[in-house]
Image: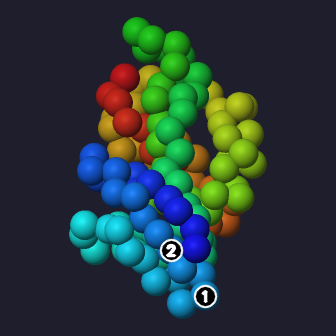
Amino acid sequence: MTELICIVCPKGCHLHVDEQDDYKVTGNSCAKGAEYGHKELTNPTRVITSTVIITGAAHSRLPVKTDRDIPKPLIFESMKLLNGVEVQSPVKTGDIIVKDILGTGVNFVATRDM
């Protein structure tokens, strides 16, 4: 039995996931908690937020995030991709900054107009 705290909503339910019973989740107050508990033990993913260098804008860093979850084991390698990225203003919210991260089909997108 693995214990987790759900991070999907502000309730922070204390989940119990039974690996021996097909990853059955208890302690959740909604279906999202059950999905999170199962996914966290079978294929954990995260949305990554970070910044990249931008030139020609009022600020020197542009905030970016992944447009979907990315497998947790790829987080550090994905972050390394951002180290060399530099964009030129103007950039609109939602513009793709890095396409198809590590062949996952997930993109880094701008989260602010600059």
Is the C terminus in the top left, top right, bottom left or bottom right quadrant?
top left
Q: Quadrant of residue 2?
A: bottom right
Q: Residues within 10 Å of mark 1 (few under 14, many from 20)?
A: few
Task: State whether residue 8 appears in this view.
Answer: no
Is 87 placed left or right of 91 in the picture? right
Q: Quadrant of residue 83?
A: top right
Residue ID at (54%, 33%): 50
Can you identify the residue that label 2 sits on?
Answer: 17
User: Residue 39: horizontal and vertical position, in percent?
Assistant: 51, 72
Residue ID at (42%, 65%): 15
Q: Residue furthest top?
A: 58
Q: Secondary structure at mark 1?
A: helix
Disc number for residue 20: 1
Is the N terminus in the top left, top right, bottom left or bottom right quadrant?
bottom right
User: Residue 49: horizontal and vertical position, in percent?
Assistant: 50, 39
Task: State whether residue 10 appears in this view.
Answer: yes
Q: Looking at the picture, which amino acid does disc 2 mark?
A: Val
Q: Quadrant of residue 20?
A: bottom right
Q: Secondary structure at mark 2?
A: strand
Disc number for residue 104: none
User: Residue 16: horizontal and vertical position, in percent?
Assistant: 47, 69
C-alpha distance separating marks 2 and 1? 9 Å
In the figure, 54 relative to 73: above or below?
A: above
Task: From the viewer's side, name the closer residue of 56 and 13.
Answer: 13
In the figure, 1 relative to 95: above or below?
A: below
Residues tagged 2 and 1 counted as in contact (Cβ below 8 A): no
User: Residue 37: horizontal and vertical position, in percent?
Assistant: 46, 69
